[in-house]
Image (cartoon, grey):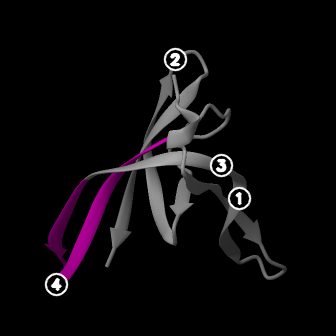
């Protein structure tokens, strides 16, 4: 059971959209699916070097009430940071969702 008092973060769920302009060039934008309350738990952080750059990664778990249509190609924004959705697990029978995501800062 999800405790409503623990859903204390404002999350924006977003989906990538691709549009074509009048010249035929594709433009990628992120459309808001919903703004919901959720629980955020940072699982672990890591720093590595790639192509002479330091890249910091944070694995985060979000818990929200159940929503249809959310999938692993979507993303979440929370408190000014963007997270790529990696996996989604259902909690109970459509009670909630546990979303595993990764934030990257370079």
Looking at the rendering, the stretch of residues picked out in magenta corresponds to: 44-63
Q: Residue at x 25, y 70 (%)?
A: 56
Mark 1 or mark 3, whichever is nearer to me: 3
Q: Position of residue 3 (x, y in %)?
A: 53, 31
**SS at circle 2:** loop
Can you tell which mark lies on residue 94? none
Q: Which residue is mark 1?
A: 32
Mark 2 burial class by Cα count in 10 Å: few <14, some 14-19, many 20+: few
Q: Are marks 3 and 4 in contact (CB under 8 Å)?
A: no
Mark 2 or mark 4: which comes first in sequence? Answer: 4
Dividing the picture into quadrants, the one containing residue 95 is: top right
Q: Is residue 56 magenta?
A: yes
Give the residue displayed 52% in from the left and 29% down from the top. Answer: 2
Determine whether 22 is above or below 100 in the image: below
Callout 4 environment at 10 Å: few (<14), some (14 to 19), or many (20+)? Answer: few
The answer to whether residue 47 is left or right of residue 20 is left
Residue wearing tag 4: 52
Spatial CA distance of label 3 from label 2 is 19 Å
From the image, tell me which residue sits under label 3: 36
């Amino acid at each position: 059971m999800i405790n409503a008092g623990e859903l204390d973060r404002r999350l924006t769920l977003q989906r990538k959209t691709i549009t074509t302009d009048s010249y035929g060039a594709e433009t990628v934008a992120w459309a808001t699916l919903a703004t919901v309350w959720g629980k955020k738990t940072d699982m672990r952080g890591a720093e590595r070097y790639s192509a002479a750059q330091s890249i910091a990664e944070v694995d985060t778990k979000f818990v929200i009430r159940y929503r249809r249509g959310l999938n692993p190609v979507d993303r979440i924004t929370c408190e000014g940071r963007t997270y790529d959705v990696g996996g989604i697990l259902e909690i109970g029978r459509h009670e909630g969702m546990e979303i595993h995501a990764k934030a990257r800062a370079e």
